Image (tube, rainbow, N blue to C red):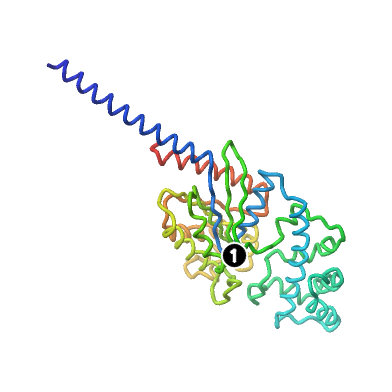
Amino acid sequence: MGGVCATGEKTEAEENAKKRAKQIDGMLKKERRATEAVKLLLLGTGDSGKSTFLKQMKIIHKEGFSAAEMLKYAKVLQENCLYSMQKILQCEEVKVGKNVKEARDLVLKAEITEFTSVLNEIKLLWQEKAVQEGFDKRSELHIPIPSLANYYFENVDRFAQENFKPSTEDMLRARLRTTGIQEVVFEFSKTEFTLVDVGGQRSERRKWLHCFNDVTSVIFLTALDEYDLPLEEDYSTNRFEESLRLFGEVSGNFFDQSTSWILFLNKCDLFETKIKKLPLNMFFDDFPEENAASYDESVKYLQQRYQANFKGGRLYTFVTCAIDTANCKNVFAAVRDSLFHGAMQGIGF
């Protein structure tokens, strides 16, 4: 009798083992298919760096930019330069000297087709102390220009050349508001990745709903240096608060718990410089004054604010600089590893 029971128990154990093996095999096949084609959705508020990160993926994993794209961005850089100078001059608090009043009037009236004709005026105005102070105080004065507008002014001579061909550095710094949906498809470590970028301005967010299907992971970008800035489309709303609210909303409402999330705390270079002049304790009552000079503690504080507002499943966080190609290359390799390990954890490994 004892021998029969042992055989029965063995048979039952074998059946359970076979079922478990079959279950694991099915899960592995499912995960293998998922890792062979990964769809990453880039989300975040406007000017968080999504489009710049997308450009980096084209540089690193594809052949960079086409001749048509370079021609397009040559004009975009001219527009960025002229628009930024006009916005500074339109600020009532920026009062330039009488010696450059004529230059000011010419730049304010200029159309983009007249960019080369006001080249010298832009250069002259950028030398004005009042204009440089306006740039430095752009957040305080609510001047809606990119944080790297000084790059445009310092390279205005190149931008105005007849056969100007943007460098990779130029392309990464060119700012063109994303409208609609942009995609980049590439292969990395035998996995096909599709990155989808949707505009981050409020008017563009209704289009996000069309991108949620078959998403493997969501990359949410936030600019670390935006804690003192208002939204371009709504000066009464702080960018950090808007980004934090949006992160909690989309992580809790639009994806199931199996979707992994990757938080990019972007623009770390600008953030490190800014907190020396505008430490976080000036804007957040619960940030210790004794940590005001600490970059690491400042990053940690903002990271914890996002983690506390997260309502999804798995969350991975990276500190990034989207205009730094080497940083983006390393970060994306880490993202790929995180997705793989997360998938293995999901099936019990």
Task: Report the side of 347 relative to 94 (left or right).
Answer: left
The x, y position of residue 149, in whole percent, is: 72, 66
Task: Report the side of 190 relative to 244 (left or right).
Answer: right
Between 126 and 102, the residue placed more toward the observer is 102
Q: In which quarter of the image is the N terminus?
A: top left
Rendered residue at 75%/78% (across/down): 89
Rendered residue at 71%/59% (across/down): 173
Residue 74 visible in the current orientation: yes
**32 w.r.t. 266: above or below:** above
Location of mark 1 (residue): 46
**63 w.r.t. 20: above or below:** below
Task: Report the side of 42 relative to 74 (left or right).
Answer: left
**268 w.r.t. 35: above or below:** below
Residue at the left extreme, as displayed? 1
Rendered residue at 87%/71% (across/down): 117
**Which image quadrant is residue 29 in?**
top left
